[in-house]
Amino acid sequence: QVQLVESGGGLVQAGGSLRLSCAASGSIFSINAIGWYRQGPGKQRELVETISSGGSTNYAEFVKGRFTISRDNAKNTVVLQMNSLKPEDTAVYYCHVYGVVVTGWGDFWGQGTQVTVFS
C-alpha cells in the first residue's frame, strides 16, 4: 500500500505564494514520476507539474514563470513552490505518483489539499 501525505495548502491573497509538499511512503519500490494535479470548482482534474526520477518535468502552460517543482529521490518527496498566485489557481491540489509496487506499475493519489487565492 502506498501513502501520499500532502501539506502546505491554504488561503492566500492574489500575488502571494504557497509551498506544497508531498511525501510518499509504503510498499513502493521505485517512483518514476511524482508531482501535482489540481481540480478547480466545476472543472476536471488537470496536470500542474510532475518531475521524473531523472529530473525532467512535464507542466501545464499556466505554470510557466510562476511554479517550481523539486524532488528528493532519496526521501520520495516532492515540493511545489507556487508564486504569483492568481484567483484562478484556486483548486484542490493532488499529489500523484507513478511507481512500482509488488503488483507492478501503478498510479497513486493523495487526498488533496485546498488552495484558495482571493483577490
Image (spheres, helix red, strand yellow):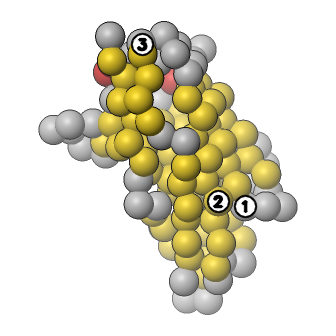
Residue lying farthest to the bottom in this orientation: 102
Q: Is residue 6 left or right of residue 91?
A: right
Q: How many marks?
A: 3
Q: Position of residue 83 (x, y in %)?
A: 57, 19
Apparent side of residue 117 relative to residue 29 in the rendered image (left or right): left
Q: Give me the residue at 33% from left, 18% from top.
A: 118
Identify residue type, mark 1. Asn
Residue 23, numbered circle: 2
Mark 1: few/some/many CA within 10 Å (<14, 14-19, 20+): some
Disc 3 and disc 1: Cα gap in Å? 30 Å
For mark 3, what is the residue?
14
Q: Quadrant of the N terminus?
A: bottom right
The mark nearer the N terminus, 1 or 2, is 2
Which quadrant: the C terminus? top left
Element class at badge 2? strand
Q: CA distance from mark 2 to mark 3?
A: 27 Å
Q: Where residue 86 sits: x, y (%)? A: 40, 16
Q: Which residue, given by chain and number where applicable, does mark 1 sit on?
A: 76
Q: Decide: marks 2, 3 in contact (CB < 8 A)?
A: no
In the image, residue 109 sits, relative to residue 11, either above or below, namely below
Disc 1 from disc 2: Cα separation: 6 Å
